[in-house]
């Protein structure tokens, strides 16, 4: 009498669990992107930002950055990996670096945009700090993106079709 699940069923289950995790991650990025759009629209209306200041805030790009970098590009990367029968495990380190870069960049966009709306006069020190941290988060994002592209190039240039 055989007890338990066959190995193939367990493998399919864990593959399905990874797929569900990726979909949840991407759907949360969609939710964050849409919420940033609402936050931008409502906070600028609430504070009469455009009537009083009249300038553009950094919040205006948070919505599109989140949707493009956090949803569209990972879906493209996933499709490219699927073409070669690979998964995100094959580009794990570069993908984690990329996702950390996205998260930090979006965080700094929201922080800077909120400062634009709610703080009338930023000190030069705070301005320099926010600009420096934003630059560092963009560097992390760029490193993760390039590393991911190099990993994809290695996968596509590999002659072994597994």
Image (tube, grey):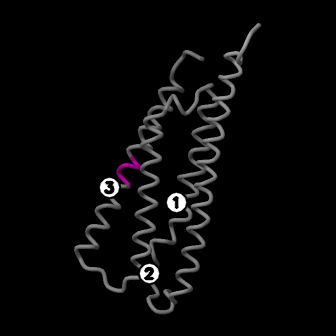
Badge 1, how many Cα within 10 Å: few under 14, some, many 20+?
Answer: some
Q: Residue lying furthest right in this view?
A: 1
Residue at image location 46% in from the left, 31% down from the top: 151
Picture quarter with the N terminus: top right
Determine the main secondary structure of the stretch shown in magenta.
helix
Q: Residue furthest top?
A: 1
What x and y, as percent, mark residue 61?
Answer: 50, 67
Q: Are marks 1 and 2 in contact (CB under 8 Å)?
A: no
Crowdedness near tag 3: few (<14), some (14–19) or many (≥20) residues, C-alpha within 10 Å: some
What residue sits 71% from the left and 21% below the top?
9
> Closer to the camera: disc 1 or disc 2?
2
Q: Earlier in the sequence, mark 1 or mark 3?
A: 1
- Find the residue positioned furthest to the bottom: 52
Q: Is residue 116 magenta?
A: no
Q: Earlier in the sequence, mark 2 or mark 3?
A: 2
Q: How many circles with numbers are drawn on the protein?
A: 3
Q: Is 99 located above or below residue 34 in the figure?
A: above
Q: Please tell me which residue lies in front, 46 or 80.
A: 46
Location of mark 2 (residue): 117
Q: Earlier in the sequence, mark 1 or mark 2?
A: 1
Q: Nearer the viewer, residue 162 or 158?
A: 162
Residue 107: quadrant of the picture: bottom left
Residue at mark 1: 65
């Amino acid at each position: 009498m055989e007890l338990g699940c066959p190995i193939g069923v367990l493998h399919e289950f864990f593959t399905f669990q990874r797929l569900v995790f990726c979909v949840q991650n991407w759907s949360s990025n969609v939710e964050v992107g849409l919420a940033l759009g609402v936050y931008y629209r409502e906070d600028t209306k609430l504070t009469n930002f455009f009537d009083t200041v009249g300038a553009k805030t950094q919040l205006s790009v948070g919505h599109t950055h989140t949707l493009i970098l956090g949803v569209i590009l990972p879906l493209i990367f996933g499709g490219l990996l699927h073409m070669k029968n690979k998964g995100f495990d094959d580009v794990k380190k570069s993908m984690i670096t990329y996702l950390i870069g996205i998260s930090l960049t979006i965080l700094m966009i929201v922080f800077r945009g909120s400062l634009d709306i709610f703080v009338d006069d930023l000190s030069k020190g705070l301005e320099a700090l926010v600009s420096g941290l934003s630059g560092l988060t963009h560097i992390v994002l760029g490193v993760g993106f390039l590393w991911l592209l190099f990993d994809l190039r290695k996968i596509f240039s590999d002659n072994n079709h597994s």
